[in-house]
Image (tube, rainbow, N blue to C red):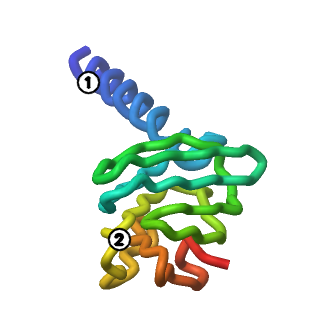
Amino acid sequence: MKKIAIFIVALLVLGVFFAAIYPAYAGSKLVKFKIINKTDQNVYIQLDGDEFYYLTIMPETTQKFTVERDVYKRTTWACGYASVGTLDLSSQIKLNFTPCELTAPNQGEPTQEKVSLYDSPTGLKWRYQDK
């Protein structure tokens, strides 16, 4: 009897675990992403795809957003500069905006990209790109 109870509890725990992670990957139309603003100014991002979003990130803060999964045309305003390109939000990502006076010492990694509007990376593995 004790073994059956342990087995049932284990099945319930696994069921809750898989129900919690499944929508975050394959089953959900939404994706969560985080923007870290290390500048001393607001960062504004306009996303234009099947849906339209206008995001404002206050100076030296981190904000989380939930949007529809898509590859968006984007316009970014930060540090008195504007850039146009794309943002692939087909899965979770963190964008780290570096201080205005600095260029990014490296581009970060594919799931946590450093954004410097003066020298944003390009290539297949980068999801925040300039035109």
Residue at (61%, 64%) from the top-left corner?
Answer: 87
Q: Which residue is mark 2?
A: 100
For residue 123, above or below residue 40: below
Compared to residue 106, the image places residue 87 above or below, namely above
> Where residue 19 sits: x, y (%)?
49, 33
Relative to 24, 7 lies left or right: left
Q: Residue furthest top?
A: 1
Please tell me whether mark 2 sits on a helix, a strand or a loop: loop
- Res 63 seen here: yes
Residue 27 visible to an observer of this rendering: no
Front residue (pair 37, 1)? 37
Rendered view: 52 above or below 119:
above
Residue under the image location 31 percent in, 20 percent down: 4
Q: Which one is in front, 23 or 65?
A: 65
The amino acid type of the residue labelled 1 equals: Ile
Mark 2 in CB contact with mark 1 (< 8 angstroms): no
Q: Is residue 26 left or right of residue 35?
A: right
Closer to the eye: label 2 or 1: 2
Q: Amino acid at mark 2?
A: Cys
| 116 on left or right of 68 | left
Q: Quadrant of residue 15?
A: top left
- Decide: few, some or many residues near mark 2? Use Cα within 10 Å; few <14, some 14-19, many ≥20: some
- Image point (65%, 68%), residue name: 86
Position in image of residue 32 (x %, y %): 50, 45
Residue at 31% of width from left, 48% of height from top?
A: 61
